[in-house]
Each structure stands twice: as C-alpha cells, then as structure tokens.
Amino acid sequence: MRINASIPIHRGMEKLDKDAFRKSIDVLAAEVAPATTHNLLKAPEMRGVIIDLPKIKSVVPAPEGKRLVLTRFTDESDLSLETKQYLESQSAKLVNHTINLDYDYWTADDILSSILPAELVEGAPSGYAMVGHIAHLNLNDEYLPYKYIIGQAILDASKNAGIKTVVNKLDSISNQFRVFKMELLAGEPNYVVEHHEADCRFTFDFSEVYWNSRLHTEHSRLVEQFKPEDVVADVFAGVGPFAIPAAKKGCGVFANDLNPNSFKYLSKNITDNRVHQLVRASCEDGRDFIRRVVSRALADPLPSPEAAVSKTQVLKAEKAARKLSQLGQLPPKLEVHQPKRSRITQFVMNLPDSAITFLDAFRGVLSPENNDGRDLSGLYKAADLPMVNCYCFTRELEIERAEKDIRERVEEKIGHPLGGDVSLHYVRSVAPTKEMYCISFRLPGEVAFGS
Ligand SMILES: C[S@@+](CC[C@H](N)C(=O)[O-])C[C@H]1O[C@@H](n2cnc3c(N)ncnc32)[C@H](O)[C@@H]1O
C-alpha cells in the first residue's frame, strides 16, 4: 500500500487541540551504507518509489552509521520485482520506519481542510493580506464559528512570513476616517506596524488610521506622474503614501488629514523618511485645507528639490568644517542656493466616497478674496493652473458611462465645464457593482479665479 499522508480529520473543531493533529506513518525503508544512498536516489529502478512529502527528508540516519532511504510504500510486497532485485544488488536491507508528524507539520490550508465542515472547505479563507506584521482577513459569516482556529492556524503556519498578529475586519469601512474595526484572532494585540512601500518606511496603528496595501500601484502611478519641481497638496493624505514618496523624488508637499492619529503618524513618517524639509503636515478639514493651502504656499514656500539635496550636503560640509577647525585649519565658506516654490501644481484627493463633494471648495481658490487681496494671476497662468487628481466611486461599469457620470458630478460641483486637460484612470473594482476611478483635470481658470 502507498502511505497515507493526509491530515487527520476533525470536522467542526472550534477550539484548537494541537495534539489531535499528531500522526504516525509507517513506511518501508531501504537501509544502506552511506556511499550507496546516492545510487538509490538516482537509479531508474527506484523511480516513483522514494518518498516525496513536503518537509520530509527522503534519507535519514540509521544505527551503526547507516542510512535509511524512505519509500512511499508500507510493505515489501508493494515493490516491483525490478526494484527488489536492484535493492538486493545494492545490498540494501528492507526495514520498517515510522515518521511522526505533529501540528507544526501541517499548513494552514491543511488545518482548515481538517476542521471545517466539508461544505465550507472549498472557498476556505486561505488568503490574507499583510500590513507590517499583521495578517488581516475578511471572514464570511459561515466561517465565524471557526475564526480563532483559522487565525491560530495562519499564525502558526506562517511564522516565517513575519506574521505576529492575525485580525478579522469586522465591517466594511463606513466611518469618517475610513478605519476598519477589527477583532484579534490570534497573536499579539499590537497594531502599530512598520510597513514598506515605494522604498519608504511607514509606521502607523492599523486600528486607528486608514491603510490599504492594495493601493500601492495607484500610489506609485500617480507619484510617477509628478515632476520633482511639482508642489503637491494632498488633501486626504492619511499617513503619507502619496506625500512621502512624492517628497522623496523632490516634490514639495502640503499633506493634510483630519484624523489626528493619521496626522501623528504622517508627521512621524515625514521625519523617519527624512523629507521634513519638503513636507508640511496639517490636520484640518479637507475643505478648509483647499481654501488655505494656496496662501500657505505663498507665506511659507517650499525649498526647491536641489535645495533639499544641498541641505544634506550642507550638513556634511558643516561636519567636515568642524573637523578642519579642530585641526586648526580654516574651513571653506559655505554657500547655499535655495530658490523657493510657492505655486501649488497638483492636488491629490483620495477619499473616493466623498472627494467630489469637496470640489466646490476650489471655486475662487485663487481669487484675491481668498488670498488676502493678492492678485495671483501672474503666478498661476492658464497653463500653470493646478491639476486636480480626484478619486471617486461609480456604479457605472462601462468606461464611457463611468466617464460621463464622473465628469457630470465633477462639473456640477465646480460649477463649470472641464477643459481639454482631463484624463480618467480605472483604479480597481471594490464590489461587483462599484468601481474606483481617478479623474485628473486642470482646474479651470473661471473656477479658480471666480468668486
Ligand atoms: C481613503 S483614505 C486615503 C489615505 C491616503 N491618501 C491613502 O491613499 O492611503 C482617506 C483619508 O481621508 C481622511 N479624511 C476623512 N475625512 C476627511 C476630511 N473631511 N478632511 C480631511 N481628511 C479627511 C481620513 O482620515 C483618511 O485618512
């Protein structure tokens, strides 16, 4: 008989009993001198005979310095005549050997296929998303009675993947700050993660702020479109997945989020990624931010990308100068050229549920009334008006209809038709009848300078 290496079945187990997953498998083995093992492993007569189980070695030590080559059979009578004759020619002695498997041997999928009712095995939640050390699941109701075993099985089987905490997201996000409520299924109740995206390090409390790893391609796509000279106003910045990579490429950034916890981690991430010269963070309502950020950029302009680089060079040069003066030598004079940037060139609005409803805040945003009486028509010429990159959802599943729907809603809010500089990018499907898009358009002058 072939060995039976399937997991013991414990359908309906709701409380994990690790001992229940112990299993002993008796196998037939060929005992040989160490020098002969290689022959057996390569011999055509042994093809299909040697054991082939994940994590199980096919050659194990035996008494008196010998080796056991394990087969996938339980009995000598299972071997073909050809195989038996070959083993005899190699002076192999057939013996019995026991392989002991325990809970740690099995994969999370194995454990779930054992404990779940048969009808739930197919479609079992084998996949999970990772944020830092947290694996998060979105369990359907029928799997909830088994949630703790599912969590523990994922934690135990995937330790090497760096998982320390497994959570189940409790609802779809409907609160203002787009934060998931979550329940701990297994591991440490520690939700402060360190996550890497686009060569940047992000620290945040996953239970207090919005983060979606699935957006990483969209974050990169938009940031790639920015030029280092751009000044970006990120209205709903979260913990900085647009703002910080943009600053890393040289953009000046005004990054805002109303959630105080997002602001706290955004500020930390700005420091940790050493982009503090190029990013100004704020914590206010998006509408107020849009109205204020133009004046803010005038009052507190951002250094140019070169200046941000030269600042690092200055620090280095200062260090070198200190050394020289300790040696009694005169350090060279340092000159820092710091042109400033005071014109916003890009707005980012990633709050797809309601970002469009904030667009009326752009009416008159560049007008003298909104900017302490200043005339900004020289700074913001028609071709230099900011691009607005606004995320939104639509229930229109066909691209032309989606475009029409989004465009109409945008134009209604800004109170003016969009000009020629408009593009629409499909981001992802969030539900069977709901898609996420990013519309990018140049702010019409009539809107920006209107009353
Ligand atoms: C969908 S998240 C996007 C975060 C980040 N830009 C990203 O791509 O991961 C939207 C963010 O908007 C923030 N937010 C919600 N309402 C806001 C408001 N009225 N003003 C400013 N920020 C707001 C939330 O706290 C959340 O961080």
Image (cartoon, rainbow, N blue to C red):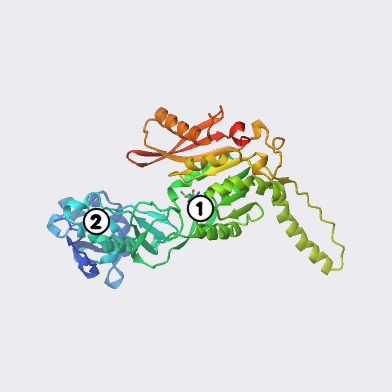
Q: Is residue 223 above or below residue 124?
A: above
Check the image and report above or below for 395 versus 67: above
Residue 392, given in percent of the width and then of the height, sits at: 45, 40
The answer as to whether callout 1 falls within 8 Å of ligand 1 is yes
Name the kind of residue labelled 2 in the image.
Tyr
Q: Viewer-proximal residue, 322 or 172?
A: 172
**Which residue has dot 2 on it?**
143
Q: Residue at x 52, y 40 (%)?
A: 359
Quadrant containing the C terminus is: top right
**Circle 1: residue type:** Gly
Q: Is residue 407 above or below residue 47?
A: above
* Pointer 2 local density, CA inside 10 Å: few below 14, some 14–19, many at least 20: some
Specify the farthest residue to the bottom.
Answer: 64
- Residue closest to the eye, 442 or 409: 409
Q: Quadrant of residue 346?
A: top right
Question: Which image quadrant is residue 109 in?
Answer: bottom left
Q: Residues within 10 Å of mark 1 (few under 14, many from 20)?
A: many
Outermost residue to the left = 77
Which secondary structure lies at badge 2? helix
**Distance between mark 1 and mark 2 Cα atoms:** 32 Å
Please state if 420 lies on the left or on the right of 380 as rendered.
left
Q: Which label was assigned to residue 91? A: none
Q: Could you say where residue 181 lies in the image, as x and y percent from the top left?
A: 37, 58
Camera-side residue of 315 and 409? 409
Above or below — where is 372 with respect to 163?
Answer: above
Give the image location of residue 106, x and y in percent: 27, 61
